[in-house]
Structures are given as C-alpha cells and as structure tokens.
Image: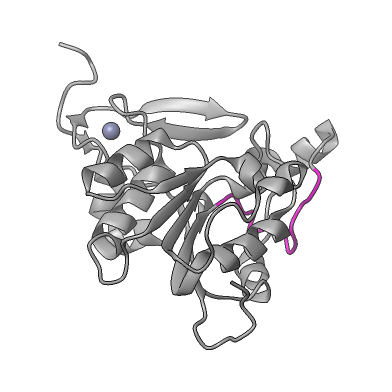
Amino acid sequence: MSRLAGNRFRCNVCGKTFNHFRKKKAQSHIHYLCPRCHSDESLRSLWFFLSNEIIGKRNKKIFLVFGNNKLLVKKLKSQGITPEIVDIGYIDSSASQKQNSLPGNIYDVIILPHVLQFITDDQLVYIELKRLLRPGGIAIIQTVTNPEMDRTYENIKTTEDIDRLKDHYEPGYLRIYGANFSKHLTKAGFDVEVVDYAEQLGLHAREYYQVGRSERELIYVCKKNINKETWKS
Ligand SMILES: [Zn+2]
C-alpha cells in the first residue's frame, strides 16, 4: 500500500482521502498539493467558497474564468456550469486588441484564481471586469499579497527585488500587492468583501482539508455596484 493511502486528510476538490498532501517548494513557500488531483490550498479554499456560497445560487449562472485552470473548469462543469475561458493574454496590454471581444454586461461571476500577479497592467483588468460583469455581478479574485508592505511592489526584476519579497515571490510574478489590496480594488470602483473562507471553515476543517493559513487563500469578492451609472456597456 502506498504511504499516501489513509484517512488523515481529505481533498474537497477530488474527494479522495490520504495520509499526506505532497509538499511542493516554490522559492521559500511550501505548497501542499493533493496527490491525486494536484489542487493546492488556494484552489481547495476557493472550491469550498464556490461550492458552498456561489454555485446554485440565484442569478449566478453565467461564469467566466481567467487563466488556464483546467481543474477549476472541470469542477465547474461537474456542477453544470460551462464557463467562458480566457487566457491571461486576453487582458494583457501586449494583446489589448483582444479586449472587448467578449460581450459586456452579462457575466454573473468572473473568477481570477492567481492570475493578476502575472498580468502586466492590472488597471486594464479592472476596466475590463467592470465592462464584462452585469450590474450586481461579482469578480472573485485570489492573488498574492504581502501584508507587511503598505503598497504594491511592481516590476519585480532583480534578485534584490526577489530577496526583498522573500517567500511571497514565485517565478513569473510581475507584482505583489501590499496590505492595501482591497483599497486598491475599491478605488478601481468595486464594492469589495475580503473573505477568509479557510478561517470560516474552522480549525478542524482547515487542518483536515489543508486549505491554507496564508494571505494566498484570501478571496476578494468584487461587486459591480448596480447604483453607479458610469459603467459603459
Ligand atoms: Zn484532490
């Protein structure tokens, strides 16, 4: 029998149990991956939130997912949701001609699972999200923040940058947000709620499902305010 076999932990994405999650080191941060479906703490936390709070709820039928997250898309499909999917290039300034190719004012839910840190111009993302969402629709964002920094750390390039960011950094990141990330989203025009769903699940579930203990698992729910009249369709 594999040393992984057992009932100590459970993955809420694939539903399997085992005795260990697999450790994966990225710079100095360690991710705990499901040995079966390879979900990480962020995705398990996100999936709890989506399956408990979003999927099946009124006016939450039309989904869009940013980035190539096959596991998330597979799970959504298993729940009868076929999301529209766009890659990061859809929004990036180098590919801005692709913008506006999706219809505006129709999406109930847009999910950005750890993609913002890879996009060159995040302001373009916010503009496009507000165009795509229907009034009252929500964007669900996970990204990396460093609560010890007041502001966003942009243009990560040098080894000095990387040393300074310590375990928040992973290869490919273009920026890491500071403690003011939710204010940043509010300023971009959203009504923002920061959800620590792993915390809400309680200690036992947090341990059993390994849904994380860091700011990486935080979920920023950004609502397109129905009362603002400045949205363009
Ligand atoms: Zn799994």
* Front residue (pair 197, 13): 13
- Residue 209 position within the rendered picture, expressed as x and y whole percent measured from the top left: 27, 43
Count of marks, rendered view: 0
Question: Toward which corner of the image does residue 9 lie, by quadrant?
Answer: top left
Left/right placement of residue 178 relative to residue 12 reads right
- Residue 199 position within the rendered picture, expressed as x and y whole percent measured from the top left: 36, 60
* Front residue (pair 199, 136): 136
Left/right placement of residue 128 relative to residue 194 reads right
Q: Is residue 149 magenta?
A: yes
Question: Toward which corner of the image does residue 74 lie, by quadrant?
Answer: top left
Q: Residue at x 39, y 56 (%)?
A: 63
Q: Residue at x 56, y 40 (%)?
A: 87
Above-or-below relation of 121 to 129 = above
- Residue 42 position within the rendered picture, expressed as x and y whole percent measured from the top left: 43, 46
Q: Residue at x 46, y 58 (%)?
A: 110
Above-or-below relation of 49 to 166 = below
* Front residue (pair 18, 11): 11
Residue 193, visible in the rendered structure: no
Ligand 1 visible in quadrant: top left
Residue range in magenta is 143-155
* Front residue (pair 106, 153): 106
Q: Is residue 188 magenta?
A: no
Q: Main secondary structure of the magenta part?
A: loop
Residue 211, visible in the rendered structure: yes
